[in-house]
Amino acid sequence: MTDLDSHLYLIGGEILVILGITIAMLNNKRQKRTLSGIFLLILGFMLAHTVTHLLPNAVAGFIFRSYHYATPRNLWIDQL
């Protein structure tokens, strides 16, 4: 990830810690529910961003491996 991504993850992590502490200190259920939703939203964005960085490499590796082993002599059509 780039330097900007590292800063965004650091800020996101800090926000999650602050929200977690604040949620633990609240007594009002409506406020807890609202902050929990914000917590899950930020966590979801961070996880989705991580997946968008990891998934392209995994898909490219799968395609490369599939192409590498799918030579004409290995295809079942050539055996007919």
Image: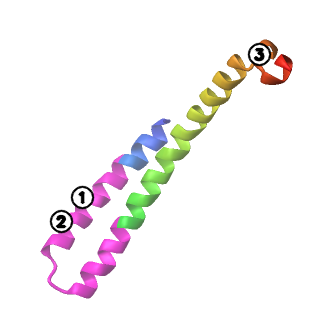
- Secondary structure under tag 2 reads helix
Tag 1–tag 2 contact (CB < 8 Å): yes
Instruction: Give the residue at mark 1.
Output: 17
Badge 2 crowding class, 10 Å Cα cut-off, few under 14, some 14 to 19, many 20 or more, is few
Closer to the chain start, of discs 3 and 2, is: 2
Comparing 29 with 74, the one in front is 74
Q: Amino acid at mark 2?
A: Ile
Mark 2 sits on what residue?
21
The image quadrant that residue 67 belongs to is top right
Whether residue 67 sits left or right of residue 26 in the image: it is right
Seen as rendered, the residue at the extreme top is 73
Quadrant for the C terminus, please.
Answer: top right
Q: Residues within 10 Å of mark 3 (few under 14, many from 20)?
A: few
| Quarter holding residue 18 | bottom left
The residues colored magenta run: 10-39
Q: Position of residue 48 (x, y in %)?
A: 49, 53
**Alpha carbon distance from label 1 to label 3:** 52 Å
The answer to whether residue 74 is above or below residue 19 is above
Q: Which residue is mark 3?
A: 71
Which of the pair 70/77 is nearer the observer? Answer: 77
Q: Residue at x 42, y 66 (%)?
A: 41
Disc 1 to disc 2, C-alpha distance: 6 Å
- C-alpha separation, residue under disc 3 versus residue under disc 2: 57 Å
Q: Measuring 19% from the left and 86% from the top, which residue is drawn there?
A: 28
Query: Disc 1 on helix, strand or loop?
Result: helix
- Contact between marks 1 and 3 (CB within 8 A): the answer is no
Labels 3, 2: front one:
3
